[in-house]
Image (spheres, coloured by chain):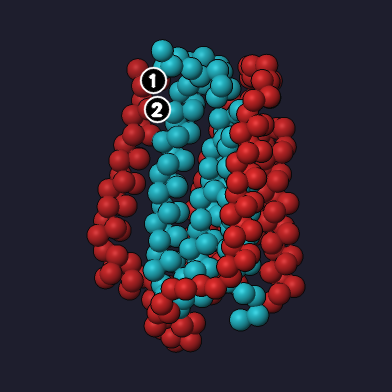
Amino acid sequence: MVVGFAIVAAWELVTAAGVIAFRRPIYNALALVGNMLGLAVLFLMLNAQFLFAAQVIVYAGAVMVLFVFIIALMNPVSDVTLGPARGGEWIYGIVFGVIFAALLGVLLVNQGLTGRSGPSTPEVINAVGNVQSVGTALYTTFLFPVEVTSVLLLIAAVGAVYLAMRRIR
Amino acid sequence: MPVPAYTFLLLSGALFTMGAIGFLVRRNPLVVFMCIELMLNAVNLAFAAISRYLNSLDGVVFAFLVITVAAAEVVVGIAIIVQVYRAGRQMDVDGLDLMKE
């Protein structure tokens, strides 16, 4: 378990560095696909099979296919106009990175998880089934957020269609 | 559980930091968008880890809602990026300062 976690964690860090560092957007997108699949494996290690499936289908399946389609459509290597590099953004990146590294150091010093433990131990969840227990939580405790999210998805679909229609007109 | 909780949180924080650095440093709007996805994924990992180690399903539900919101965000965001690209054939977030003045 520890060895597996170390391997997947190293994979996650390498692919995340790839997302930042590659110069061609298609390589960034492929590195992000690898990152999301590794994250799905981490969800499995955390006994969240439902999240694993949602991650693979929604992120690696739908979102990244959209990214790759758009990159192929726009072909941003040949005719993209990038202005001259100013170098100023690197300063913001370094400052932000140092601040967050300090916060991670705080996390290393303060390792305890102080929340109150709930009833859903892995044994309880696996006795019912992961998808069943998550679905029950979604449609009883979290019914209102789910409804709000469905309205949000509808608005997003209408907005995307509107933005695409404007070009045709 | 041999892997302690804070290692998952450390990994999540490291991924979030890398996403934020990429968000600040890169200038291609598509790559900036990918860095946003990286940050959302890192937050999902923290949600799932805390949910697992506190024996609660709330974190898993939150992560699921984050995934749906991220999908909606990607759809609208990419539509806007394509519109901007078609208007000016410009792929530099530093150059998109028409609304500055």
Q: Which residue is mark 2?
A: A164
* Above/below status of A135 relative to A159: below
Quadrant in the picture for residue A5 = bottom right
Which chain is indicated by disc 2?
A: A
Foreground: disc 2 or disc 1: 2
Image coordinates for residue A43, horizontal then vertical, percent: 56, 67
Q: On the picture, is B22 further left or further right than B51? A: right
Q: Amino acid at mark 1?
A: Ile
Quadrant in the picture for residue A44 = bottom right
Image quarter where the N terminus of chain A lies is: bottom right
* Above/below status of B6 relative to A1: above
- Mark 2 element type: helix
Q: CA distance from mark 2 to mark 1?
A: 7 Å
Q: Are marks 2 and 1 in contact (CB under 8 Å)?
A: yes
Q: Which chain is cyan?
A: B
Question: Drawn colour of chain A?
Answer: red
Image quarter where the C terminus of chain A lies is: top left
Q: Which residue is mark 1?
A: A168
Residue lying at 50% horizontally and 66% vertically, measured from the top left: B48
Q: On the picture, is A45 further left or further right than B82? A: right
Q: Amino acid at mark 2?
A: Ala
- Mark 1 element type: helix
Image coordinates for residue A149, horizontal then vertical, percent: 32, 52
